[in-house]
Amino acid sequence: MDLSAIQSALKAAGLDGWLFYDFHNRDQIAARILSMDTHRFASRRWFYYIPAQGEAQKLVHRIEPWRCDHLPGVKHIYLPWQELHRLLKTILGPAKQIAMQYSPLNAVPPVSIVDAGTVELIRSFGVKVVSSADLVGRFESHLSSADWESHQKAGRLMQMVKDEAFKEISRRIKAGDAPREIEIQRFMQDLMKRNNLIAEDGPVVAVNEHAADPHFEPTESNSLKMKKGDLVLLDLWAKQQAPGSIYYDITWMGYIGETVPDEHESIFQIIRRGRDAALQCVQEHFRNHQALHGWEVDEVCRKVIAEAGYGDYFTHRTGHNIGEQVHGNGVNIDNLETKDERLILAGTCFSVEPGIYLPDEKRGYRTEIDVFVTEEGDIDVTGAIQEKIVPILTL
């Protein structure tokens, strides 16, 4: 934790402080920013207050007085609840406006962690609680050069896994051995394991109508056999098997044939244009040193697809933050499921992944890239960017 950097950010935001609070290791954002030991049993409430100026303050229970010992600041110990309230009010002192892991109207669910009762308690002291969302983006979702390097290494390997999966489908179809979706998934999982890549689940291998389900997961019972003329969607994500590694997450489309029919390629080109418009929006804003929010990028992408007549078939946000978790806690590219009013910050990574899903026609389409904003404001996309559907039988 860089205390001086946090205090500088608080001053720049016009905030009096940032109050961290946790109970039973519920707040993983606080755990990561403050390097809390979540493996040790925790049964009592603790608070850590970083004022914009002055010493940090720790408030811990008498049974667990060690809880924040690794952090700088003055320690206060409470036992009865009345003492907790009194000390907390004293610690906040003259503060009028502080940040917490709170989101008005639950607009940004990843940072909507502090319970309503605790927010009410702070407000009872005459202190206004505002969202820490942009602070979280800066101090929890910011990637170092080493972080970014781990993302790039994972990216090179995942691009290889994707390429080999398409080749394996081609090989087996040509050999008359129709693979099932789950068999190609296992082929990809084995490649990932052999290259020291890890993921909690996935990848997605979806054919035809399964590609029309954005969260399809192949199983033994639902997997389709692949055949010539099938549309194939591969969605794969993983990171290196090392502490602090950053995920890589892409989606590619293929067609089991030597040429791709216009009915498929024309729709893919719509989502490609939406993806590229979103990327261009980010590039232009950072080139011109203009502030940009997640919801604005979603709007740019969604407009392209809506104007093509498929707005009702783009049924999820345009993208999500990427970090040590594939769905990180930073800004999402979203003005559909939420209006993400957080700023896109230098040093952060996010996906851009528009899709069109046509379940009645038994087909779906998605393209996905990972976008990183460097400290200098340059925009980097790791790995190959899909421009056309892959004709699998040419491989």
Image (cartoon, helix red, strand yellow):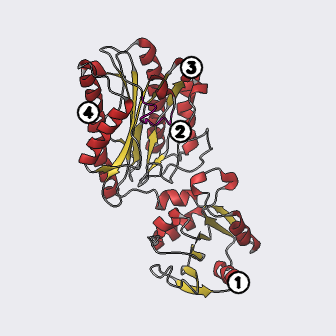
Closer to the camera in the image, 214 or 271: 214
Give the vertical position of 47 relative to 279 (above or below).
below
* Precedes in sequence: disc 4 or disc 1: 1
Instruction: Give the image quarter of residue 62.
Output: bottom right
Quadrant (top left/top right/bottom left/bottom right) for the C terminus:
top left
Residue 304 visible in this rendered orientation of the protein: yes
Instruction: Give the image quarter of residue 155.
Output: top left
Q: Residues within 10 Å of mark 2 (few under 14, many from 20)?
A: many
Give the foreground label among 2 and 1.
1
- Tell me the residue that label 4 is attached to: 164
Task: Point out residue 297 in the picture as x, y percentages from the top left corner.
Answer: 53, 38
Which residue is at a point 54% across and 22% down the rendered structure image?
358
Quadrant (top left/top right/bottom left/bottom right) for the N terminus:
bottom left
* Precedes in sequence: disc 2 or disc 4: 4
Task: Point out residue 207 in the picture as x, y percentages from the top left corner.
Answer: 42, 25
Q: Is residue 311 magenta?
A: no
Report, in whole angstroms, how far the alpha carbon at label 2 lies from the one at label 1. 45 Å
Q: Which residues are magenta?
A: 214-223
Report, in whole angstroms, how far the alpha carbon at label 2 lies from the one at label 4. 32 Å
- Tell me the residue that label 3 is attached to: 360
Report, in whole angstroms, how far the alpha carbon at label 3 lies from the one at label 1. 61 Å
Give the foreground label among 2 and 4.
4
Q: Residues within 10 Å of mark 3 (few under 14, many from 20)?
A: few
Closer to the camera in the image, 285 or 203: 203
